[in-house]
Image (tube, coloured by chain):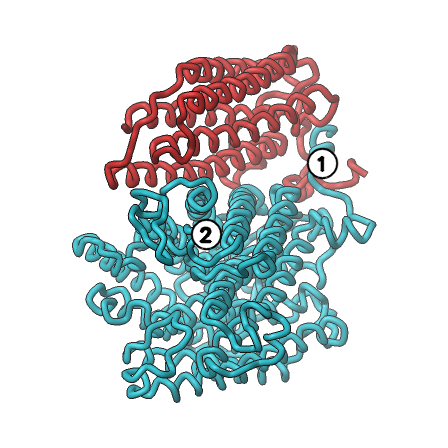
Amino acid sequence: MATTLTPPLAADGVKHEETQPSVGGGGFPPPARPRDGGGDGSDRPDPVAQAVFRYKLGTWVGIAGIVMVFAAFTSALVVRSGLSGDWVAVELPRVLWLSTALLLISSLTIEKAKRLLRRGVGVRQWLTVTLGFGVLFIGSQWFGWRALAERGIYVSSNPGSSFFYLLTAAHAVHILGGILALSYAVIRVWRPGVWVTRQAAVEATAIYWHFMDALWVYLLLLLMFWR
Amino acid sequence: MTEVAEYVEVHRHPEPTSFISKWIFSIDHKVIGIQYILLAIVAVFIGMGLSLLVRLRLVWPEKSFAILGDLFPIGAPDGVMTPEFYLAMLTMHGTVMVFMVLTTAPQGGFGNYFLPIQIGAADMAFPRLNMLSFWTTFLSFCALMVAFLVEGGAPISGWTAYPPLSALNAAAMEGTGQDWWIISIALFCIASLLGALNFIVTTLELRAKGLTMMRLPLTVWTWFVTAILGLLAFGVLLAAGILLLLDRNLGTSFFIPGGLVVNDQLVNHSGGSPILWQHLFWFFGHPEVYIAILPGMGVTSHVLATFARKTVFGYKAMVYAILAIGGLGFVVWGHHMFMSGMSPYSAFVFSVLTMCIGVPSAIKTFNWIGTLWGGKIRFTTPMLYAIGFVSLFVTGGLSGIFLGQPTVDLWFHDTYFVVAHFHLIMGVAAIFGMFSGLTFWFPKMFGRFMSEGLGRIHFWLTFIGVYAIFGPMHYLGMIPHPRRYAETTGVDFLAAGGANEIQYFITIAAMITITAQFLFLFNFLWSLFKGKVCTEDNPWEATTLEWAIPSPPPHDNFAGKIPTVYRGAYDFSLPNAKRDFAMQCNSDEMVFPRSSGD
């Protein structure tokens, strides 16, 4: 079945060059090349690279949507903190620094996994390590919420605490999504399967995970300095 | 060849065989498009029924309708609608229409079905995500319907859900209806974000060879820009909805001010701002207007060019106008809030920016008329609806210029003038875009034509009907007749202005127009099974890629043979050509006789 179908960009009848594995590639094709535009008449791009790029672009577009959610939360925070004088800034629990460290390190580990992708060794291990850090981050955040609750600060205590819980929880939900994506990427890399989906899964997840990291640093700074 | 073949194997899903995978949980963009359209058709009839109740209550506030007493024993005891019931119907009418009809059908329905085909793709970029979008939308629709059934009934705070009314849980005689409303909207936001992502990547990445952005059909342009608007707008509504849900259920005070007394009880909240909700809501709400209308503009351009047998007048200007409308749509939300106590300086800025939207809108209107000018016009039903769209767009747009002035808006704010304005431009014009699209693409989608005769009758009844309904509302607004009041028949200054007679006339006109919609429904259903069979690929002699494949299209659209595109989307009436049109996939050798080159 597979071979009878024409690949989308080779449909003009010109035989498409096979993608050759790179030197010492362990059966893996060369890295994805970014390409310009769609089928706008440019030279036939590499369909594998195109497919991988599609997933990466999808991730970026999704990130734009998430940015808008947090932009809305931020503007609500800025407006609300300027009203009524009932704002009490939350003294951040110390465990958040542990969370931050965990997430920063996980960004490095997933980058490592991504860079090993071409060589095909150690990807799964580094992804699993990242996954572990992600789970630890959620655990660390949980302790942060517990620490606040023990101080008697709940979501409805004052607008400052409302926003603290709201922003950290909204971020945690997105981290959970990242953990799901990581799990999927681990499975993809584990199972012998199609290179395209493997590469796409790892690269797209890496973009998302870095964004989660940056988003967390942003939220932390916002909660620290907008008092 | 292995990698490419494997990739193709993964991407091109095989044709499903079971009923469930083919028609229910389908990942085929065409089936998903039809699912969206069917959802919108169900929703539009529910929304229309609700508007009928609103109209009945306005004209006969005391009258008993036995059937309502049976259906809604609390909202309409003994068949007489309570004011709260009126507000609930009004809220649900707005919500159902704006979200479940105006946002789903033009983008999710027609966009899903035709965007991939018009750009020469086998499917959307992410077919499974596409399925997820639809079913999340469906869940959202179900959650909205649950709001009717819970204790306390449907929410009463309008489709804009302004706090404090929407944010107070116990005080305002409400049960969980408003919570279900928020859950429904939140789900809808998520579904729309996923859909928007899919549309954007598909348009950028899956275009056939030769199909540059400036050769795209204008329909694709409008779906693309609509997706960008959705991507940037729905996240904000989602955030606002979450805040509102927290205010209602977890005791936070984002939107509820301190010292509020409702039903003689001091509300236990402090310091929030209802205006904050208005800002967040309208930052979404104004782009939402363009989300509803832009695809209609695209269809109108497409249909006008096809049946005037002329290329779209000023194609590039049309594209830039679409982009300008989309961009400006994000910086004018304050014109919904002139009366919120905003600084006159802010109001001035929002007003000027609002006026700026008049420029690209005028460009579009001018170009539509330019497209029609001197054309060999074929008055088919889709063409009638498209011309109707232009008429409604102009009428609705002109009243927008009045409302965009803060000083004039002092008088018109929250009157029937506003109701007339947004119904004409956002509601009815967009619906006419859908009528046009459905009748135009029906032969492609289902392999049969809709009845032209019934279509004409429906067009004239509806076209005259909507003007009869919304035209007099401008006058009502000048009295000024406030909107959202359940009972105005006994108000002296309104009665003196003739409001009672006008309201009566509007209700009668609405009843006739609503009845006419069943004609369209009948035409749709009858034509599905008994309509004239469409044997040709290109019955309208149109130019875009969807007309280069069989009607209805095969499972993977192009049967593996993705066409190459050689020309722009609207090459009609070419001099020296063999036919009076050239399809996008026709090379010059196919279009012109061989001798023409000499």
Q: Quadrant of the C terminus of chain A?
A: top left
Q: Which chain is red?
A: A
Q: Which residue is mark 1?
A: B10
Dot 1: few (<14), some (14–19), or many (≥20) neighbours within 10 Å? Answer: some
Residue at left 63%, top 82%?
A: B454
Residue B263 position (above or below residue B521)? above
Residue B83 position (above or below residue A60)? below
> On the picture, is B272 further left or further right than B585?
left
Residue at left 56%, top 71%?
A: B435
Q: Position of residue B282 (x, y in %)?
A: 36, 53
Q: Which residue is mark 2?
A: B170
> On the picture, is B55 further left or further right than B354?
right
State which tag comes first along the sequence, 1 or 2: 1
Amino acid under label 1?
Val
- Disc 1 element: helix
Q: Which mark is residue B128?
A: none
Q: Quadrant of the N terminus of chain A?
A: top right
- Visible in this render: residue B572? no
- Disc 2 element: loop
